[in-house]
Image: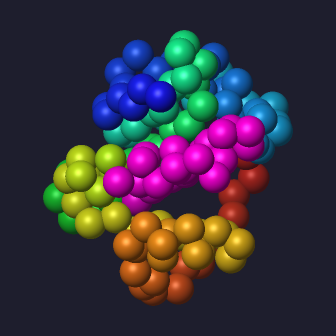
Amino acid sequence: MDYIVDDKQLNASVFLLLVNKIWPGNYDAERTQNALSKTLNITAYDGKKLIGCLRILSDGYYFGTITELLVLPEYQNKGIGSNLLQLAKANTPTMLYFGSQPEVERFYEKNGCKMGMQSYTIEKKRE
């Protein structure tokens, strides 16, 4: 496994192969590339295959959030998500605030994250 912190070579076509295996959808490649350019991308590769990605969105001083932590299903429960999270902790410019699905809370707690404030959402339809 190879891990890259601040993977500047990550492109939308490779990222969307990963995303669609976890969250199938019709994603716009140009908008995805724009989104990737605004985050610190920490990636995991098995050879040339992207198998995991954690993205951090931060203002660099006050606020940071993990936008997503994705690992291909066939690579889950092998420590890859934990490694990505440890790299995020070591390389974030700020504290990180993020939400979690209820079934994943134990993973974050096991990795030293503390439960904080309740999260809320304001939904917006994807255009």
For this rendering, which residue is in front, 92 or 63?
92
Question: Which residue is drawn at the image coordinates 39% and 31% (left, top)?
Answer: 3
Give the number of marks: 0
Q: Quadrant of the C terminus?
A: top right
In this rendering, is residue 127 above or below 37?
A: below
Asked whether, in this view, residue 90 is left or right of residue 67, the answer is left
Residue 47 in magenta stretch: no
Measured from the top left, where is residue 30 in percent x and y? 59, 21
Measured from the top left, where is residue 64 in percent x and y? 33, 59
Question: Which residue is drawn at the image coordinates 69% and 64% (left, top)?
Answer: 123
Residue 38 visible in rendering? no
Q: Residue furthest front?
A: 78
In this rendering, is residue 96 above or below 28?
A: below
Question: Which residue is drawn at the image coordinates 59% and 47% (left, top)?
Answer: 78
Asked whether, in this view, residue 57 is left or right of residue 53, the answer is left
Question: Which residue is drawn at the image coordinates 76% and 33% (left, top)?
Answer: 20
Q: Which residues are magenta?
A: 65-86
For this rendering, which residue is in front, 48 or 121?
48
